[in-house]
Amino acid sequence: MVRNFVGHILESEHFEVCTAKDGGSAVDLFRRGAFSLVILDWHMPGLSGESVFDSLAEIRPGVKVIVASGECPEDVKCAFHGRNVLQFIPKPFPIDDFVAAVKTALAA
């Protein structure tokens, strides 16, 4: 449900969006595509957010990643410590803040 909601928000802002149902699918999709930005949830079916991030960075070092999570921000930041995450967005998030974060990340 969240994946579809986020996709709809971004598509309404004229971004091209691809979604994955779980961590393994996300890595496979990333391996086959040329993505400008990845929005990654910390907890998802299959692989953990950290494992997915590490796989993406191995495939393409310097990949732009935003992490979104409804978990405690300090726990998420600790879990991704040392990884080059552009931004952490706590859920639930105001739509305008989310879109602004995406635009900022793409411009970085």
Image (cartoon, rainbow, N blue to C red):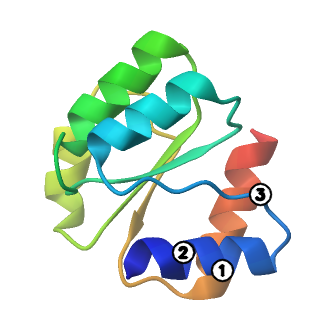
Q: CA distance from mark 1 to mark 3?
A: 11 Å
Quarter assignment of residue 50:
top left
Classed neighbour count for the residue bearing mark 1: other residues with Cα under 10 Å, few (<14), some (14–19), many (≥20):
some
Q: Nearer the viewer, residue 17 or 85?
A: 17
Task: Locate residue 108 relative to residue 98 in the image: left or right.
Answer: right
| Residue 72 in the image: above or below residue 66 | below
**Residue at image x 68%, y 48%?**
105
* Residue 29 spot, x, y in % from top left: 51, 36
Q: Does the CB distance between marks 1 and 2 fall below 8 Å?
A: yes
Mark 3: secondary structure: loop
Rendered image: mark on residue 6: 2
Q: Amino acid at mark 3?
A: Glu
The residue most toward the right is 14
Looking at the image, is 45 positioned above or below residue 8?
above
Residue positioned 32% across, 23% down in the render: 54
Residue 91 placement, left or right of 79: right
Q: Quadrant of the N terminus?
A: bottom left
Residue under pointer 1: 9
Question: Of the residues under marks 1 and 3, which one precedes in the sequence?
Answer: 1
Which marked residue is nearer to the observer: mark 1 or mark 3? 3
SS of the residue at dot 2?
Answer: helix
